[in-house]
Image (cartoon, rainbow, N blue to C red):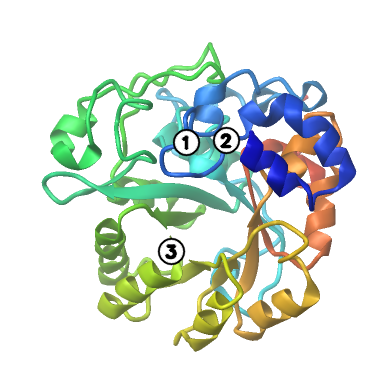
Amino acid sequence: MAAMLRRQRSLPARVVLIAAGVAVACGDDGDTQGGGGLGGAGGAADGGGGLSASDFIDPSSYDCGAGEPLPADRPYAFGCLHDASCMSRFIAAHRMGTIFAPENSLSALRASILIGADVAETDVRSTLDGRVVLVHDAEVDRTLDGTGNVRDFSLAEIQAMAMIPKSTDPVDADFSCDRAPTMEEALAVADGKIVIEFETKETEAAIVTAQYMSDNDLYGTAYIQCAPDECDAIRAVVADVPIMVRVTEMAHLDQVEAYDPPPILVEIDGTQTWLVPEVLDRIHGTGAKAFTNVFFSADVVAFGGDYSLYDEIFEKDVQVLQTEFPHWALYGIGRATPLP
Protein backbone atom coordinates (compact mmCIF):
# COMPACT_ATOMS: atom_id res chain seq x y z
CA MET A 1 0.00 0.00 0.00
CA ALA A 2 2.79 2.46 0.85
CA ALA A 3 4.42 1.90 -2.53
CA MET A 4 1.12 2.45 -4.26
CA LEU A 5 0.50 5.73 -2.43
CA ARG A 6 3.97 6.97 -3.38
CA ARG A 7 3.17 6.31 -7.03
CA GLN A 8 -0.14 8.15 -6.71
CA ARG A 9 1.52 11.51 -6.06
CA SER A 10 1.74 12.07 -9.81
CA LEU A 11 -1.70 10.65 -10.64
CA PRO A 12 -4.91 12.66 -11.08
CA ALA A 13 -6.60 13.64 -7.82
CA ARG A 14 -9.66 11.52 -8.58
CA VAL A 15 -7.40 8.44 -8.70
CA VAL A 16 -5.98 9.13 -5.25
CA LEU A 17 -9.44 9.54 -3.76
CA ILE A 18 -10.60 6.12 -4.94
CA ALA A 19 -7.39 4.12 -4.85
CA ALA A 20 -7.03 3.37 -1.15
CA GLY A 21 -10.31 1.49 -1.07
CA VAL A 22 -9.64 -0.72 -4.07
CA ALA A 23 -5.86 -1.19 -4.13
CA VAL A 24 -6.14 -4.77 -2.99
CA ALA A 25 -7.74 -5.68 -6.32
CA CYS A 26 -5.07 -4.20 -8.57
CA GLY A 27 -1.92 -6.00 -7.54
CA ASP A 28 1.57 -4.96 -8.52
CA ASP A 29 3.44 -7.04 -11.07
CA GLY A 30 6.28 -7.79 -8.69
CA ASP A 31 7.77 -11.26 -8.75
CA THR A 32 6.55 -12.40 -5.36
CA GLN A 33 3.79 -9.96 -4.45
CA GLY A 34 1.28 -11.47 -2.05
CA GLY A 35 -2.03 -11.95 -3.80
CA GLY A 36 -0.47 -11.63 -7.25
CA GLY A 37 -2.84 -8.98 -8.56
CA LEU A 38 -6.50 -9.78 -8.94
CA GLY A 39 -5.73 -13.46 -8.78
CA GLY A 40 -5.26 -13.42 -5.04
CA ALA A 41 -7.18 -10.36 -4.01
CA GLY A 42 -10.74 -11.23 -4.86
CA GLY A 43 -13.90 -9.21 -4.72
CA ALA A 44 -13.31 -7.12 -7.83
CA ALA A 45 -15.51 -8.75 -10.44
CA ASP A 46 -18.58 -6.62 -9.71
CA GLY A 47 -16.94 -3.19 -9.47
CA GLY A 48 -17.00 -0.54 -12.14
CA GLY A 49 -20.52 0.68 -11.57
CA GLY A 50 -21.88 -2.85 -11.69
CA LEU A 51 -20.31 -3.95 -15.00
CA SER A 52 -18.80 -7.36 -14.41
CA ALA A 53 -16.79 -9.49 -16.84
CA SER A 54 -19.79 -11.79 -17.30
CA ASP A 55 -21.82 -8.82 -18.52
CA PHE A 56 -19.60 -8.82 -21.62
CA ILE A 57 -18.86 -12.49 -22.34
CA ASP A 58 -20.55 -15.67 -21.14
CA PRO A 59 -18.05 -17.88 -19.25
CA SER A 60 -19.40 -20.93 -21.08
CA SER A 61 -17.96 -19.47 -24.28
CA TYR A 62 -14.37 -19.77 -23.04
CA ASP A 63 -14.22 -22.32 -20.20
CA CYS A 64 -13.35 -26.02 -20.48
CA GLY A 65 -16.49 -26.83 -22.46
CA ALA A 66 -15.89 -24.14 -25.09
CA GLY A 67 -14.57 -24.57 -28.60
CA GLU A 68 -12.02 -22.52 -30.50
CA PRO A 69 -12.49 -18.81 -29.79
CA LEU A 70 -13.21 -16.34 -32.58
CA PRO A 71 -11.75 -12.89 -32.01
CA ALA A 72 -13.97 -9.85 -31.74
CA ASP A 73 -13.72 -7.27 -34.49
CA ARG A 74 -10.78 -4.89 -34.15
CA PRO A 75 -10.22 -1.53 -35.88
CA TYR A 76 -7.03 -2.72 -37.59
CA ALA A 77 -5.61 -5.69 -39.47
CA PHE A 78 -3.84 -8.35 -37.43
CA GLY A 79 -0.12 -7.57 -37.43
CA CYS A 80 -0.61 -3.87 -36.74
CA LEU A 81 1.06 -4.05 -33.34
CA HIS A 82 4.36 -5.14 -34.90
CA ASP A 83 4.16 -2.58 -37.72
CA ALA A 84 5.89 0.71 -36.91
CA SER A 85 3.73 2.54 -39.46
CA CYS A 86 0.45 1.27 -37.98
CA MET A 87 -0.77 3.39 -35.08
CA SER A 88 -3.85 2.30 -33.19
CA ARG A 89 -5.02 1.88 -29.59
CA PHE A 90 -4.25 -1.50 -28.05
CA ILE A 91 -5.46 -3.11 -24.82
CA ALA A 92 -3.27 -5.71 -23.08
CA ALA A 93 -4.86 -8.20 -20.69
CA HIS A 94 -2.73 -8.77 -17.59
CA ARG A 95 -1.83 -12.43 -16.96
CA MET A 96 -3.80 -13.41 -20.06
CA GLY A 97 -7.07 -12.08 -18.58
CA THR A 98 -7.10 -12.95 -14.90
CA ILE A 99 -10.48 -11.28 -14.32
CA PHE A 100 -12.11 -13.88 -16.59
CA ALA A 101 -10.53 -17.14 -15.38
CA PRO A 102 -7.52 -18.52 -13.47
CA GLU A 103 -4.50 -16.34 -14.22
CA ASN A 104 -2.23 -17.41 -17.07
CA SER A 105 -4.70 -20.13 -18.08
CA LEU A 106 -5.85 -21.08 -21.55
CA SER A 107 -9.40 -20.25 -20.46
CA ALA A 108 -8.27 -16.70 -19.64
CA LEU A 109 -6.54 -16.52 -23.02
CA ARG A 110 -9.68 -17.64 -24.84
CA ALA A 111 -11.69 -15.02 -22.95
CA SER A 112 -9.27 -12.25 -23.91
CA ILE A 113 -9.56 -13.29 -27.55
CA LEU A 114 -13.36 -13.25 -27.38
CA ILE A 115 -13.62 -9.87 -25.65
CA GLY A 116 -11.32 -8.34 -28.27
CA ALA A 117 -8.18 -7.63 -26.24
CA ASP A 118 -5.20 -6.99 -28.49
CA VAL A 119 -2.45 -8.46 -26.29
CA ALA A 120 -2.40 -11.21 -23.67
CA GLU A 121 0.48 -10.75 -21.24
CA THR A 122 1.94 -13.79 -19.53
CA ASP A 123 5.10 -14.97 -17.72
CA VAL A 124 7.75 -17.49 -18.74
CA ARG A 125 9.60 -19.85 -16.40
CA SER A 126 11.60 -23.03 -16.93
CA THR A 127 10.76 -26.46 -15.58
CA LEU A 128 13.28 -29.01 -14.33
CA ASP A 129 13.31 -30.67 -17.77
CA GLY A 130 13.82 -27.43 -19.67
CA ARG A 131 10.27 -26.72 -20.83
CA VAL A 132 8.75 -23.25 -20.67
CA VAL A 133 5.58 -22.86 -18.63
CA LEU A 134 3.45 -19.80 -18.01
CA VAL A 135 3.53 -19.21 -14.26
CA HIS A 136 3.96 -15.80 -12.64
CA ASP A 137 5.52 -16.66 -9.28
CA ALA A 138 8.77 -18.53 -8.76
CA GLU A 139 6.76 -20.89 -6.54
CA VAL A 140 3.66 -22.84 -7.48
CA ASP A 141 2.01 -22.43 -4.08
CA ARG A 142 -0.32 -19.49 -4.81
CA THR A 143 -1.74 -20.53 -8.18
CA LEU A 144 -1.30 -24.30 -8.44
CA ASP A 145 -2.19 -27.21 -6.18
CA GLY A 146 1.36 -27.88 -5.04
CA THR A 147 4.28 -26.57 -3.02
CA GLY A 148 7.75 -25.66 -4.21
CA ASN A 149 9.65 -23.88 -6.97
CA VAL A 150 8.56 -24.18 -10.59
CA ARG A 151 12.08 -25.05 -11.71
CA ASP A 152 12.20 -28.03 -9.31
CA PHE A 153 9.35 -29.84 -11.10
CA SER A 154 9.18 -31.52 -14.50
CA LEU A 155 6.57 -30.35 -16.97
CA ALA A 156 4.50 -33.46 -16.28
CA GLU A 157 4.59 -32.74 -12.55
CA ILE A 158 3.60 -29.10 -13.06
CA GLN A 159 0.71 -30.02 -15.31
CA ALA A 160 -0.52 -32.60 -12.83
CA MET A 161 -1.30 -29.70 -10.47
CA ALA A 162 -4.78 -28.21 -10.76
CA MET A 163 -5.11 -24.44 -10.83
CA ILE A 164 -6.36 -22.96 -7.56
CA PRO A 165 -9.68 -21.13 -8.06
CA LYS A 166 -9.88 -17.40 -7.30
CA SER A 167 -12.80 -15.68 -5.61
CA THR A 168 -13.26 -13.61 -8.78
CA ASP A 169 -13.65 -16.63 -11.09
CA PRO A 170 -17.22 -17.03 -12.40
CA VAL A 171 -18.97 -19.51 -10.14
CA ASP A 172 -20.88 -21.18 -12.98
CA ALA A 173 -17.83 -21.82 -15.17
CA ASP A 174 -15.82 -25.03 -15.53
CA PHE A 175 -12.07 -24.49 -15.28
CA SER A 176 -11.27 -28.02 -14.14
CA CYS A 177 -9.26 -28.74 -17.30
CA ASP A 178 -6.93 -25.78 -16.83
CA ARG A 179 -3.32 -26.43 -15.98
CA ALA A 180 -0.27 -24.19 -16.25
CA PRO A 181 0.09 -24.03 -20.04
CA THR A 182 3.30 -24.35 -21.97
CA MET A 183 4.52 -21.55 -24.17
CA GLU A 184 3.75 -23.73 -27.20
CA GLU A 185 0.17 -24.40 -26.10
CA ALA A 186 -0.54 -20.69 -25.63
CA LEU A 187 0.93 -19.81 -29.02
CA ALA A 188 -1.22 -22.45 -30.70
CA VAL A 189 -4.39 -20.92 -29.23
CA ALA A 190 -3.30 -17.34 -29.96
CA ASP A 191 -1.97 -17.74 -33.50
CA GLY A 192 -3.59 -15.12 -35.72
CA LYS A 193 -6.12 -14.15 -33.01
CA ILE A 194 -4.23 -12.21 -30.35
CA VAL A 195 -0.64 -11.17 -29.69
CA ILE A 196 1.10 -12.75 -26.70
CA GLU A 197 3.52 -10.82 -24.55
CA PHE A 198 5.99 -13.16 -22.86
CA GLU A 199 7.33 -11.37 -19.81
CA THR A 200 10.83 -12.48 -18.85
CA LYS A 201 10.74 -13.97 -15.38
CA GLU A 202 13.80 -16.08 -16.17
CA THR A 203 16.15 -15.13 -18.99
CA GLU A 204 16.77 -18.78 -19.86
CA ALA A 205 13.04 -19.35 -20.41
CA ALA A 206 12.77 -16.21 -22.53
CA ILE A 207 15.65 -17.36 -24.75
CA VAL A 208 13.96 -20.72 -25.31
CA THR A 209 10.74 -18.87 -26.15
CA ALA A 210 12.52 -16.52 -28.56
CA GLN A 211 14.19 -19.45 -30.32
CA TYR A 212 10.86 -21.25 -30.68
CA MET A 213 9.27 -18.11 -32.14
CA SER A 214 12.13 -17.82 -34.63
CA ASP A 215 12.12 -21.48 -35.62
CA ASN A 216 8.34 -21.50 -36.19
CA ASP A 217 7.88 -18.13 -37.90
CA LEU A 218 5.81 -16.72 -35.03
CA TYR A 219 7.24 -13.23 -34.86
CA GLY A 220 3.88 -11.71 -35.81
CA THR A 221 2.04 -13.45 -32.98
CA ALA A 222 4.22 -12.63 -29.98
CA TYR A 223 7.04 -10.61 -28.49
CA ILE A 224 9.36 -10.83 -25.48
CA GLN A 225 9.14 -8.27 -22.67
CA CYS A 226 12.47 -7.70 -20.94
CA ALA A 227 14.59 -5.27 -18.96
CA PRO A 228 17.62 -3.95 -20.90
CA ASP A 229 20.09 -6.51 -19.52
CA GLU A 230 17.63 -9.33 -20.19
CA CYS A 231 16.96 -8.03 -23.69
CA ASP A 232 20.71 -7.95 -24.38
CA ALA A 233 21.06 -11.60 -23.35
CA ILE A 234 18.05 -12.67 -25.42
CA ARG A 235 19.12 -10.72 -28.51
CA ALA A 236 22.63 -12.21 -28.19
CA VAL A 237 21.07 -15.58 -29.03
CA VAL A 238 18.12 -14.61 -31.25
CA ALA A 239 19.21 -11.32 -32.77
CA ASP A 240 15.97 -10.26 -34.43
CA VAL A 241 13.28 -11.47 -32.03
CA PRO A 242 10.59 -8.83 -31.40
CA ILE A 243 11.03 -7.26 -27.97
CA MET A 244 9.44 -4.76 -25.65
CA VAL A 245 12.07 -3.05 -23.50
CA ARG A 246 11.03 -2.18 -19.95
CA VAL A 247 12.77 1.06 -19.04
CA THR A 248 12.96 2.29 -15.46
CA GLU A 249 15.51 5.09 -15.78
CA MET A 250 16.16 7.67 -18.46
CA ALA A 251 19.56 6.18 -19.32
CA HIS A 252 17.75 3.10 -20.61
CA LEU A 253 16.42 5.15 -23.51
CA ASP A 254 19.96 5.29 -24.91
CA GLN A 255 19.99 1.49 -24.97
CA VAL A 256 16.56 1.43 -26.60
CA GLU A 257 17.83 3.66 -29.39
CA ALA A 258 20.82 1.36 -29.99
CA TYR A 259 18.85 -1.84 -30.69
CA ASP A 260 18.94 -3.16 -34.24
CA PRO A 261 16.29 -4.11 -35.15
CA PRO A 262 14.53 -1.66 -32.83
CA PRO A 263 12.04 -2.85 -30.23
CA ILE A 264 8.42 -2.89 -31.29
CA LEU A 265 7.38 -1.50 -27.88
CA VAL A 266 8.87 0.36 -24.95
CA GLU A 267 7.26 0.02 -21.51
CA ILE A 268 7.31 3.11 -19.30
CA ASP A 269 5.80 3.97 -15.94
CA GLY A 270 2.42 5.68 -16.15
CA THR A 271 3.42 8.84 -14.30
CA GLN A 272 4.03 12.44 -15.26
CA THR A 273 7.76 11.78 -15.27
CA TRP A 274 7.43 9.47 -18.26
CA LEU A 275 4.21 10.42 -20.02
CA VAL A 276 5.69 13.60 -21.48
CA PRO A 277 6.38 14.55 -25.12
CA GLU A 278 10.18 14.49 -24.83
CA VAL A 279 10.17 10.86 -23.63
CA LEU A 280 7.41 9.68 -25.95
CA ASP A 281 9.05 11.39 -28.93
CA ARG A 282 12.29 9.49 -28.27
CA ILE A 283 10.38 6.21 -28.08
CA HIS A 284 8.44 6.88 -31.26
CA GLY A 285 11.62 8.05 -32.97
CA THR A 286 12.94 4.49 -32.82
CA GLY A 287 9.80 3.16 -34.52
CA ALA A 288 8.51 1.71 -31.25
CA LYS A 289 5.11 2.15 -29.65
CA ALA A 290 4.69 3.30 -26.03
CA PHE A 291 3.21 0.88 -23.47
CA THR A 292 2.14 1.57 -19.89
CA ASN A 293 0.23 -0.13 -17.07
CA VAL A 294 -3.01 1.42 -15.83
CA PHE A 295 -3.52 -0.70 -12.71
CA PHE A 296 -3.24 2.32 -10.40
CA SER A 297 -4.81 4.89 -12.67
CA ALA A 298 -7.60 4.10 -15.14
CA ASP A 299 -8.42 0.74 -13.53
CA VAL A 300 -8.85 2.40 -10.14
CA VAL A 301 -11.05 5.17 -11.52
CA ALA A 302 -13.20 2.59 -13.31
CA PHE A 303 -14.20 1.12 -9.96
CA GLY A 304 -16.28 4.25 -9.52
CA GLY A 305 -17.98 3.73 -12.87
CA ASP A 306 -15.86 6.30 -14.73
CA TYR A 307 -14.19 4.76 -17.79
CA SER A 308 -12.91 7.97 -19.36
CA LEU A 309 -9.33 7.81 -18.09
CA TYR A 310 -8.41 4.98 -20.48
CA ASP A 311 -9.10 7.33 -23.38
CA GLU A 312 -7.31 10.21 -21.66
CA ILE A 313 -4.12 8.19 -21.29
CA PHE A 314 -4.24 7.18 -24.95
CA GLU A 315 -4.55 10.89 -25.77
CA LYS A 316 -1.09 11.41 -24.27
CA ASP A 317 0.26 9.49 -27.30
CA VAL A 318 0.55 6.11 -25.61
CA GLN A 319 -0.38 3.18 -27.85
CA VAL A 320 -0.80 0.21 -25.44
CA LEU A 321 -2.48 0.11 -22.03
CA GLN A 322 -2.14 -2.98 -19.84
CA THR A 323 -5.12 -3.51 -17.57
CA GLU A 324 -6.53 -5.94 -15.02
CA PHE A 325 -9.97 -5.30 -16.54
CA PRO A 326 -9.93 -5.55 -20.36
CA HIS A 327 -13.73 -5.37 -20.53
CA TRP A 328 -13.73 -1.97 -18.79
CA ALA A 329 -10.90 -0.61 -20.93
CA LEU A 330 -12.49 -1.79 -24.18
CA TYR A 331 -15.85 -0.42 -23.08
CA GLY A 332 -14.21 2.89 -22.18
CA ILE A 333 -12.75 3.33 -25.66
CA GLY A 334 -15.91 2.20 -27.44
CA ARG A 335 -14.79 -1.27 -28.53
CA ALA A 336 -16.95 -3.46 -26.27
CA THR A 337 -20.58 -3.38 -25.20
CA PRO A 338 -22.39 -5.43 -22.55
CA LEU A 339 -24.42 -8.43 -23.68
CA PRO A 340 -28.13 -7.74 -24.35
Secondary structure of the residue carrying tag 1 is loop
- Kindly identify which residue carries mark 1: 33
- 148 shown above or below 329: above
- 73 shown above or below 46: below
Q: Nearer the viewer, residue 289 or 196?
A: 289
Secondary structure of the residue carrying tag 3 is strand
Mark 2 / mark 1, whichever is N-terminal: 2
* Horizontal and vertical percent position of residue 222: 44, 61
- 83 shown above or below 170: below
Note whether residue 330 is visible.
Answer: no
- Kindly identify which residue carries mark 3: 226
What is the distance, in whole Å, between disc 3 and disc 2 at their CAs?
Answer: 20 Å
Q: Quadrant of the C terminus?
A: top right
Residue 28 figure quarter: top right
C-beta proximity under 8 Å, tags 2 and 1:
yes
x 82%, y 40%: residue: 15
